[in-house]
Image (cartoon, helix red, strand yellow):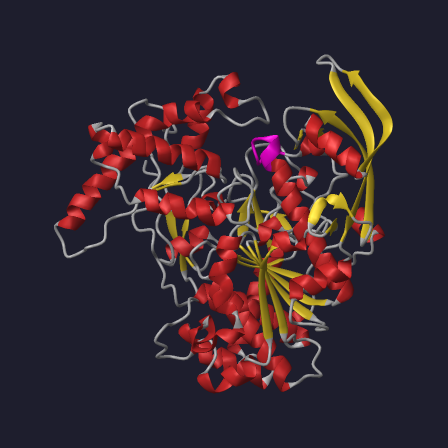
Amino acid sequence: MSFEVPSPILCSPYAEPDRHWFIPEGATPVERDGRRPAFVFQPRDGELSWDLADGTLAKLPEYDRAWELTLVNRIRARVAEWRAAGYPNATGTTIDLLAHWRRDGRQQPLFFAQIEAVETVLFLVEGRPDLRQGLAVPLDEPTAEHAAAGARAFLRYACKMATGSGKTTVMGMLAAWSILNKVVNRADARFSDLVLIVCPNVTIRDRLRELDVDGGDASLYRTRDLVPAHLMPRLAQGRVVVTNWHVFEPRTQGVGGDTSRVSKIGKAVTRTERVYIGDKSTVARGERYLTLADYTRLAASGEIEEVEPPTTSGAGERVSALVRWTRYVESDASIVARVLGRAKGKQNILVLNDEAHHAYRIRRDDDEDEAIDLFGDEEQEQEYVREATVWIEGLDRVNALRGINLCVDLSATPYYLGRMGRDSGRPFPWLVSDFGLTDAIESGLVKVPQLAVRDNTGAERPKYHNLWRWIMSCLTPAERGGRRGSPKVEAVLKWAHTPLVLVAQDWERVRTEWAATEESRPPVLIIVCRDTKLAKATYEWIVEEWSSGRPALRDAVAPQCGRRREHHSRGLQGGERNGQRCDDIGRAGRSRALDAVHPRHRWSS
């Protein structure tokens, strides 16, 4: 029995899929007519009972642990009907743009995945009311804590698009649609001429600068032919702000630029908690640690006030104190004005969240005993919680002061990745469009992943099928760092050596074959690591092996890999904390479409 697919690519990337592979676990794949319905696999790493009350999911019996995205499939059918009818009820501007994007003879034709994602949003905003009847997209309701602070729900639509299927172009199409419609009819509140694009780090932010309407012919609107040349002056009447989520974090007020000297200007934020004196200032397992030097400095500046004097407690005789933190930070109005910059006073904003799985409300009151561990260590989880919290609270401030007309989330993995109790790993309820990794593979949009399917161990699943899990199974408890600790880098590399040599030898074989042809570019070997700390150590280890003259790596690993790794580290460290997970490269490794592969870690060639 063969579990391999003989021909992964079945469809054109420019047309709606009309064939798909049915791939049941433990059985031979079967090629089927028609498009695959949208569905999602529940994580294997725990027994979760997702909340099904909103009606967006239903059990799919054909697969184990699979759930149909019922709302997505209903919307997909209605969008197809709207398209076939010629987009009834759409504005003239919208119809002209759709005709421009779908016309024959385009020098750069758009993928069906891009067209459908945009059509879905446009349909939910402009579609004929009878076609939209019964399609209730759940709101992103604030938690009780956020609601008490003044937050209110705003409309979100999430579009799932595989990495490599062109999310940036979709953002450009949506921005153009909104701005051009608003310029034509200023009274139409469905549209916005201010677009706020939020992304996870400065590397992506700099890449998205091509969405700035001030770029003219150098912008994506012209280089990808998204807006006809004669409409560019109208587009320039709008504004696109591209930023990363860090700017939403309230800045501490200081004196003369010195934040160590407290200025009681701005908004006072007070909280009471127990802090422990430790070797470094951090948060671990829900407890805050401060070095003695940091504790002394904060107490002297008045930023913390002792509620109870320091005491020793616990088996380790830890020193702790109950303190009241008071920080003076900039007001919400100041934050929003700083983020939106020159767009002073603009209201009714269209928000586009790039890599939107970073932006959701952490449900701190959920039963975390039911949650699965999708992070691996406490420090990584705390950083993720901080990112999600700052991002969504920043949007709450924008919504409260300027109004969010619509928020469109774009991600290859629009799921609750953690801190959601029993809903951890569940798709966002406001997911409206789905073109995932398997669909993208079958349409020839992305590279085809190759997984180990057999080895000489005789095991049902080869040990290198999921390399990260296999390595973790080989480590001792001390090397793994405990249930929520970080694995020791040297232990990981010890077990990674042999598989890396194998894939490097395969790289060399391909390079030799290409050298005999007219192809002047070398093949690229990419190693995806869990975070930049492991990536840096892996790179240094490869260089050491290469330079030491060991034949296996010396002949197989190209020196150019040093430049690629160096660039990636600079991109993350420019605006992120060292050790943060590798967002820009690792996203493809998190797709749940290939359930056998660990959703967060993949080594590939």
Residue at left offset 45%, top offset 71%: 220
Residue at image point 57% right, 67% down: 120
Rendered image quadrant of residue 342: bottom right
Tell me residue 529's x, y (percent): 44, 37
Query: Does the segment drawn in magenta span residue 530?
Result: no
Quadrant position of the C terminus in the picture: top left
Residue 401 visible here: yes
Q: Which residues are magenta?
A: 372-380
Q: Is residue 356 left or right of residue 141?
A: left
Please name the predominant secondary structure of the magenta segment in the image: loop
Residue 431 position (above or below residue 189): above
Looking at the rendered structure, the number of numbered marks drawn on it comes to: 0
How far from the left and from the top, in percent, is residue 272? Answer: 83, 35
Residue 188 coordinates in the image, percent (x, y)? 69, 81
Give the vertical position of 312 relative to 283 (above or below).
Answer: above
Side (left or right) of 299 relative to 45: right
The magenta stretch spans residue 377: yes
The front one of 112 and 321 is 321
- Left or right: 2, with 63 as reference point: left
**Residue visible at 52% across and 41% down?**
581
Query: Where 591 sits versus 80, above or below?
Result: above
x and y, in percent, of residue 29 in the image: 38, 45
Name which residue lies at 32% across and 22% down. 457
Instruction: Work out which quarter of the rendered image holds the N terminus and state it.
Output: top left
